[in-house]
Amino acid sequence: MTDIFEIDTPAVLIDVDRVEANLRRAQDYADQHGLKLRPHIKTHKLPRFAKRAMDLGAIGITVQKLGEAEVMADAGISEIFLPYNILGQAKLKRLRALAERVHISVTADSVETVEGLSAAFADAPEPLSVFVECDTGMGRCGVQSPQAALDLAQRIAAAPGLRFGGLMTYPAAGQVAANAQWLEQAKDLLTQAGLAPPTISNGGSPDIWRAHEVQVATEHRPGTYIYMDRFQVAKGVGALEDCALTVLATVVSRPTEHRAIIDAGSKALTSDLLGMTGHGLIEAYPEAVIVGLSEEHGTIDLSACSKKPKIGEKLRIIPNHACVVSNLFETVHLIVRDQLVETVPVAARGRVD
Amino acid sequence: MTDIFEIDTPAVLIDVDRVEANLRRAQDYADQHGLKLRPHIKTHKLPRFAKRAMDLGAIGITVQKLGEAEVMADAGISEIFLPYNILGQAKLKRLRALAERVHISVTADSVETVEGLSAAFADAPEPLSVFVECDTGMGRCGVQSPQAALDLAQRIAAAPGLRFGGLMTYPAAGQVAANAQWLEQAKDLLTQAGLAPPTISNGGSPDIWRAHEVQVATEHRPGTYIYMDRFQVAKGVGALEDCALTVLATVVSRPTEHRAIIDAGSKALTSDLLGMTGHGLIEAYPEAVIVGLSEEHGTIDLSACSKKPKIGEKLRIIPNHACVVSNLFETVHLIVRDQLVETVPVAARGRVD
C-alpha cells in the first residue's frame, strides 16, 4: 500500500468511501421522495462512478457533450440524457450513430434545433426523444414561458423522427418555489393540449435536498453532490467531511514568514471563485488563504495561521469547484483513508465537443 | 482546403501568419537591443513553435513543468530552462534523467531546494546549472533581497553537483524601474563577492517592449507574446490584429432578444477575468459582452449590438488569456487567413507535474 503523501504533486485524490456515502445519501433521499435520479457525470467523468450510481438506483446518466456520451456508451452505459441543443451536421451525425447503440435523449429550445434533429432522424429506425429546455429562472438556455414550451413541444411531437420526451430545466439556485411554479404551469398547459410531459427533469446539486419541493418534477440531475466541494459546503449542501475530491500539492517556497507557494495553480485548481474568498481550503491549515493563482503557482497568505507549513510539505486542498478540477487531470488517485488504492484515467476528461 | 467556419466547435484556431509576425517582432526587438530571448512555451505547448522561435534566434526555451521539459526534449530541443523549485525524489529523478540528454537549468529560492538538487546531482557527470530566483516585486517565489540572493548563490556555488547559473525573476508587470534596480544591486553585490552572475534572466510579456530598460538583464522570457490575447491588448502589448489564437464557438441558443448562448464555457475559455469585464472579445460582434460562463455554456449580452447572431452561427472569440486555453484542448487548428492548414496535437498540454 502507498501512503497518499507519497504521491507526486499536484495530484487529485478521490476518497472512495466518501463517494459511496454521497451517492447513497442522494439515492436514499430520492427513494424516500419517490424521485428518480439521473446523475450528471461532468463532475467525475469516470465510467465506474456512473455505473455505481446506477447500481444504487439511478435510472440513467446525464452528460453535457457528445464526447462524454461516447465515452460512457463505450463503457457500457445505455441510458444517457444529453440536455443540450445539438446543432450542425458533424454533431448530428455523431448523435445519430450514438442513438443506434444506446438510448439517448436530448433537449431543444428553438425551432432551429428541432428542425436539425428532425432532418437527422427522419429515417431513423427509432424516433429520438427530445425534451423542451425551459428557462425557469437561470437565465441561460431555455424557452421563456410555459406557452413557448407548449409551442415547441407541439413542434417536436409533429416532427418526423422525433418524439416529445418532456420538460427539462437547470434552475437558478435557491429559487425552488419559482422553478416549481413555472414547471407546474407548463405541465398544466401541455396536459390540457393533450401533450402531457412523460418526464419533467429538474437539476443541480445546490438545491438537491429541496428537490422534493418541486413536486411536479419526476427526476433530478445532480452532479457535484458525488464529490462535494468548497462551494457546496458554503451553500450548506454538504459538510467538509463529505468532500471526496482533494488536490494534493507541495509547498515549493516559503519566501516570507507569511507567504507560502504551492505547486498547484490555475492549471490544477482553476480560477473559479464562485463568489468566495480564496481558491480552496487547505485541510491542515484552515486559517490559510489561497490568495492568488498563476498557472503553476498558488500563493498562500499564512498571516492568520498559528503553525505554518514547511518547504516540501504536502497539503490537501478542497477546491472551490470540483468539476472543473476533474477536467484538468489525466488521472485521479482513488484512496481509502490515507492509502492509495488505484490510479485511474479520467476517461471523459477534455471532451470539448 | 477547408474553410475555418466548417470546423466543428468549440475549437481553437491558430493563425500561423500572426504567430510568425509575433515571433519575428520580438526577436527583432531583442536583436536591436542586444538582448537574448528564451521564450516560454507554456502559451502554445507545441514543439513546432518552440523550434521556430529558436530558428529565428531564440537561445533556448523556458518551461514551467518537468513534463513540459520532457515533451520538448523528446521533440529534439536541447536547451531548456525550468525556473521552478524542483523538490522530492520523484521529480529529482526525472530532472536527473533529463539532464543526461539535454542541457537543462533550474531555479532555487531556498536552502532546502538547493540541498535536494545537490543530493540528486552530486554524482552526475555534469553539474546542474541552478539560478537564484529573485522576488523583485511580484510577491510570488524568490529570495527577498539582494543579500539573500548572494547568500543562496554562495550555497549553490559550494554545493556538490551544482553550478551557479545566475539570477532569475518574474517581475511585477509595470514595475520596470524597481525590477531593474533590484537586479542591479544584486549583480553588484554578487560581483563584489566574486560570484558575478553569468546570466540575468528577466521575464514576462506585459513589459516585453520595455525589456531593454532592464539593462542589467542578459535575457528575456516572454510567453504570451506569441499568441497575444485580450489581456495583452488591454495592456497595450499588441493590437487585436496581432491575436493569433481564437476560440471558434457556435451560437446554440437565442432565448431572448438580447441573450445568446454559445457552446464555449469555462471548459473552453476558462474563468480567468484578469480584472477585465467579460470573458473574451467576439470579433464579429465587438459590442457583445460574454457575461457569464458555466462549464459548457457561455452567456452573451447582446443589448449593445445593432446586428445580432443567429442560432447556428459560428463566432471567433479572442480569449482573455491564451495560455490557459491551450491547456484545455487536445488539438489546435493551424490556419492561414480563413483556411484550415493542419490540425495538430497540443503535445505538452496537461503536463501537471
Image (cartoon, coloured by chain):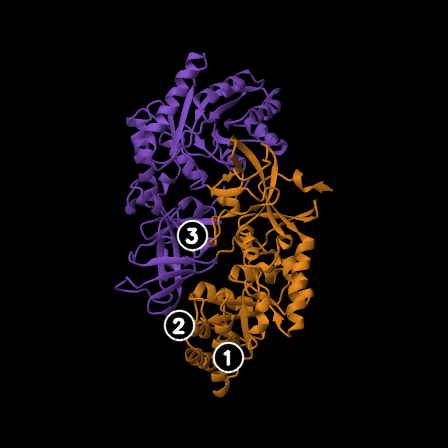
Chain colours: A orange, B purple
- Name which residue type carries label 3: Leu
- Residue B282 pos. (x, y %): 33, 55
- Whole-percent x and y of residue B98? 56, 30
In the image, B321 versus B14, the foreground residue is: B321
**Residue A158 higher or lower than A63, as above or below:** below
Q: Position of residue A178 (x, y in %)?
A: 48, 73
Above or below, B79 relative to A97? above
Q: Can you say whether B39 is above or below B130 in the image?
A: below
Which residue position holds label 1?
A: A184
Per the image, label 2 sits on a secondary structure element best described as helix
Disc 3 is attached to a residue of which chain? B
Q: Residue furthest right?
A: A1
Q: Mark 2 lies on which chain?
A: A
- Residue under pointer 2: A112
**Residue occupied by mark 3:** B269
For the residues bearing labels 2 and 1, Cβ distance under 8 angstroms: no
Say how many tags the image has: 3
Same chain for the residues under marks 3 and 1 in the image: no
Amino acid type of the residue tagged 2 in the rendering: Glu
In this rendered view, identify the residue nearer to me: A55 or A99.
A55
Q: How crowded is mark 3: few (under 14 residues within 10 Å), some or many (20 or more)?
A: many
Amino acid type assigned to the residue bearing label 1 in the image: Glu
Please check whether the numbered discs 2 and 3 fall on a single chain.
no
> Could you classify mark 1 by the number of other residues whose Cα lies within 10 Å: few (under 14), some (14-19), or many (20 or more)?
some
